[in-house]
Image (cartoon, coloured by chain):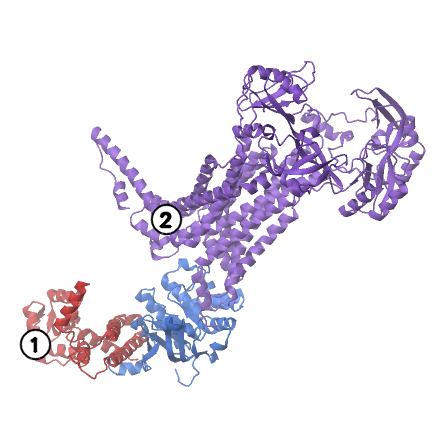
Amino acid sequence: MSPSRLRAAYQVCILRAMSIRHGLLALLERGHMYGYQLRAAFEESTGSTWPLNIGQVYTTLARLERDGLVRPLPESEGGQRPYEITDAGRADLALWFATPISRTDRPRDELAIKLALALTTPGVDVRSVVQAQRTATMRTLQELTRLKFASDRPEDLPWRLVLDAMVFQSEAEIRWLDHCETSLVRYRPTPGRPAAGPPVDEAVDRTDQEARR
Amino acid sequence: MSRLGSARRPAAPVDHPGAASRRRTGSRRALRLAAWFGSWRAALRIARREARRARGRTALVLAMIMLPVLALTFVAVSYDMARLTRAEELDRRLGVADADLRAITDRPIRQDAWGSGPWSVDEGTVRMVPPGTVEEITALLPPGSRAVPVHRWVPFEVRRGDRDQTIAARALDLADPLARAHARLLSGRAPAGADEIAVSRAALSDLPTRVGDRVTVADGSRSYRVVGVVEFPDDLGVVVALHPSAVGRTQPSGDAGWLVDLPGGVDDDLVRRLNAHGVLVAARAPVPGAPLPRADTGADATDWGNGVLVGGLGLLEVVLLVGPAFAVGVRRRRRDLALVAVAGGDAAQLRRVVLADGVVLGALGAAAGLALGVAAAFAGRPLVEQYLMNSRFGGYRCFPAALATIALVAVVAGVLAALAPAWTAARHDVVAGLAGRRSAPPHRRRWLLIGVVLTLAGTGLATFGAARTNPTWVLAGLVLGELGLVFVTPALLGVLARAGRLLPLAPRIALRDASRNRSSAAPAISAVMAAVAGSVAIGVYLAGGAEREAGRYRPALPPGHVLVTRTDGNGTGPLPQLSLVAELARTQLPGGRPAPLAYPACATGDGNCDVSASLPPGRACPYDLGPPLSRAEQRAALADPRCDRSDGYYSGPSVGMAVVDDGSALPGLTGAGAEAAAAATAVLRAGGVVVDDPRRVVDGRVTLRVNRTDDRPEPVATTTTTVPGYALTDGIRADRLILSPAAAARVGLVGRQLGWVVATDRTPNRGEQDRFTRALREHLRISVEVERGPSEQDRSPQLLLLALAAGVVTVGASAIATGLAAAEGRADLSTLAAVGAGPGVRRLLSLCQAGVIAGTGSVLGIAAGLGTAVIILTAVNRRYAESWPVEPPYPLVVPASVAAVVVVVPVVAMLGAGLFTRSRLPVERRLD
Amino acid sequence: MSGTAQPVLDVRDVHRTHGAGPAAVRALRGVSLTVAPGELVAVMGPSGSGKSTLLALAGGLDSPTAGEVRVDGECLGVLDRRRLARVRRRRIGYIFQELNLLGSLTAAENVALPLELDGVGVRTARRQALAALAEVELDGLGDRFPDQLSGGQQQRVAIARALVGERRLVLADEPTGALDSRTGEAVLHLLRRRVDAGAAGVLVTHEARHAGWADRVIFLRDGVLVDSTAPLGSVEQLLSGSPR
């Protein structure tokens, strides 16, 4: 087990969840840095999975400076201008840490879309899709748990919490898949019609029937 | 509850006195009252629903409250129906007659208004001839009156096997409505002549006889023909109804008289006239001119006190038996109760919810018990009349006062049983209750203290009461002591559970369970304890009493020896030869050796001669048995060697004090050893006498005193003679005087043989005695008595009943507690099964749980019972030790039946619990 | 974790039907499962899928309508109730969601229970029990009664009991059900450690998070085994690849 790798994975998880803006703020919180340093640190933390060009760094820094969250320092002998975080920046960063990330912020629900598509596409065994997905997620969950079990030193706590976050996300996914599976048991697509749901008139009928009851 | 909450909110302070404040106070009181009612209503509703939900437990509690109520109701109603009102009593006595006259005595009397109560004889007046025939009584009555004779008791002797038996007989004309009163002719006809009788139904089977048969009296002098079957409502036993002509003139006594029909009513003048002739008058209305008797004062305070205490003990027992069920109910409903608390119920309201259980179940049990009891009493009336009361009841009625009391007591029992659980319920931790956790309520040292104090106080009171022979105080002390032990039991359980650490698994779990569920285990143990303690204490007392009585017994003959006495007429006819008697005795009795037995009689002339060996002055005890002695005198008497005699009683064969014998009957009479008997016989041969009290022999001589008496109480003549005497101290000592024929002749007496004394090798059994009697009766009318030692006043049924009652309570209490523990412990059993407990463990556990209850209860009960008995007996004995005449102390005897039951019952309870428990553990679910 | 070792639990094609006729409920329909020493298998499925029936069969508390169950190579079907109880107390450790401990016994006594039932002397059993308690980090609490322990502590006592002696099969039925997630996790941690030390474990749960602790997860639906995850590699293998 290599601690540096663990540290790296930790960074990934932290940075994945944050915007570049708050990422840079967070890096500056460690100490003052200039543009290239920031970019290198950013890429190191993301394991090079999130390439960032230097232009993005400077644009973001400029915006941060405009908002009074960072402050440029005098140029060094190498002609590089380091930035340091301001009190307002620290406050902003703290506020961000304190604010829960809303589910809608997340860009994807690819899986949900995939399942919805599978349902409406003839010839696809949705149940096996669900089961395959669940087995895969379960495996991920097992892996995460195994990682967690392996890191039981007190200083690994932040790391374990990150793993927990992912464990809980996987768990939620499995529960959702379970829910899909039980819902599928009752689902009977109407033959000869696009299986997009009950037609409007039929739905009206049913409501009427229910009303009459 | 919410309404309650608002009611409890403190009202705004009222700072100026006046109408407004008064109104507000009034409305506040009304609110508080409404709240109280509301909370009780809610509590009762919860209790009702709960009773319906937990059917098993409800049935158990109901049964336990209902059964005693049923029994008490049955007794109370039957008693009330059997107790005749004065009107019923008079009606039964008079029938259609106007008055009941009884010739009481041969002097004028004064009577009370009812003619039943005390009457007094005018002393000092001349005796006259009381009316004895119908004519004589009619002469005293106004013209136009009619009187018929009614004899309410006439001796009637019949032979039953080898014994003569007197049965009740009446003489009245059953054909006459006036005489018949309430007697009913069931079949046949009324006796019409002196040689006809009617008999009661019981007599038909008892005699036995049939209508048309003949019944012969014991001495064979008369024989009657049974012509009918009759029922007298006041006596359903064996009764024979004779025709009045079979009885002669009415003798003055309370048993005979006349029923009369008077043209006018009973008047002052008539009563005076009849009273003057010794005739008592009873009529339907109070007799004019006679004082009304004072009202009956009823039972005295002591009886009441004892009744209340015994009832209290019974109540305690019911409370202790029912209590565990409520405790379990509370435990089951911890969550509900916590919810009530969350909804704003305060401790009082929580208590009320549990108390309401007691009220509801007590009331239901009482209602059911009353209904069933009254129904049973009404339905069982004929049986009770026939077999228990032996007389017809006055009518159907149900004693409302007693029933109300019983019902009240039942409800009180229910509430009392729910009291302790209610207190615990109010103390429970609400949060723990909501979470379903079980927090054992902390045991309060206070209760232990109260228990110890109560026990000590009870012991003290009982000792004090015993020392003063005040049964009420003794009982009160016992009740207090038992209450104290009830309070101590939980603490004791805790100690036991701690001490049981190294026990094997099952008993350890059982002990710990009992300790953890103290609220239900402790009352069950206490119930067992109370029952066992009671039965042991009473058993020891009764057994000690029996032993003590036996110790006072003075045999008249050596044990097993037989006395044969002639019972024929005047006893002057010829007796069978000794050889014949010897032959019969040898063949019928174990080693029977008869010797003729003769009693002294006046040698010449009429009258009775009574001989005794006089006690020389200075040798007699200076203290008299008659008047009570002071303490100092008693102590002096105790220290005096001349006064060592204690009171004894004789109930064996009736051998006379003085006997005339030449030495042949002596061994059979006294059972003295050969050497002593030879010495005594030598003295008799030499013309002396033998006594068994050495104080009567002075220098080898005994002074005889003979009193000759005739009809008058004073002796006509007294003779004193001194003859050689011998003190026979060997064998039994019955203060007997044996005269040689020569010595008898010297004092003007002669021996008259009245029977034989038969020495035996062992005590003959009843069969041998009966066979011997029958064989000898062919030659002479005799009676045969055997010295069987102290009569076994057979207390064993009482003791057995007591022990059985304790046993039933023990088994019941352990069954209840074990059942409740089993219901509680299902989860534990599942765990045990999963952990790998074998199928027997569940049984073993039940067995141990029953054992904890029954065993602990029995051990405590035995200790408490023995302690009680020791306290009482010691106190009584201490007092006896200083009393003279010497009272033998009560020995401490544990009756075998009680001991056996007390030891056996817990084992039975345990085995029963083991047997009735399914061995399968609840989670096990197998296909086999 | 080597596949050559004899499985501790071997369930072969078991069926279990409750009741008969039209009312019959088929709780299990041909389920097979083997658990090797050092392996923890989680059984997942919704309520009524047959998880608990499977566990009861494995523990000898229930017997299959068809198929056979072997524990350490011994077939449970041929044993009578008495012998079955012996197998339970010698080879199998059972942990429930609740109702785990006898309230009348102290923690140490609860742990010693299977030993005592097996006839081990009180003192020996106590010594072993205290050692087992120390292993679950409950040193010094041996003489407390369950009432005086927290939920997590109680469950740890139950685990100590399930593992005391030489048990090789641990059956856990929703062992964390009544606990908060932190405490529940500690309990699973403990279970995991014991399995790594050589026991075989079956964990019935309906929470994926808890199933994550297993080496293998099987899914039951209506009495049929529908899916199963492949065994995991080592931690190093996991870390060398992408975390996701």
Task: Give the SS element for disc 1.
Answer: helix
Residue type at mark 1: give it. Tyr
Callout 1: chain: A
Side of C93 where B619 appears, left or right: right
Give me the residue at 77% from left, 27% from top: B621
Side of B674 where C70 appears, left or right: left
Is A183 or A90 nearer to us in this picture? A183
Tags 1 and 2 on a common chain: no
Residue B851: which quarter of the image?
Answer: bottom right
Callout 2: 10 Å neighbours few (<14), some, many (20+)? some
Residue C103 lies, with reference to residue B885, above or below; the image says below
Callout 2: chain: B
For disc 1, the marked residue is A58
Residue B798: which quarter of the image?
Answer: top right
The residues bearing labels 1 and 2 have C-alpha atoms spaced at a distance of 80 Å
Side of B186 where B328 appears, left or right: left
Q: Nearer the viewer, mark 1 or mark 2?
A: 2
Can residue C123 be seen in the rendering of this structure?
yes
Is B662 or C179 nearer to us in this picture? B662
The colour assigned to chain C within the rendered structure: blue
Is B679 or C161 nearer to us in this picture? B679
Residue B473 lies, with reference to residue A23, above or below; the image says above
Image coordinates of residue B12 in percent, x first then y, are: 22, 37
Callout 1: 10 Å neighbours few (<14), some, many (20+)? some
In the image, the chain rendered in red is A
Residue B829 lies, with reference to residue B909, above or below; the image says below
Residue C221: which quarter of the image?
Answer: bottom left
In the image, the chain rendered in purple is B
Is B107 or B590 nearer to us in this picture? B107
For disc 2, the marked residue is B48
Residue type at mark 2: give it. Arg
Task: Give the SS element for disc 2.
Answer: helix
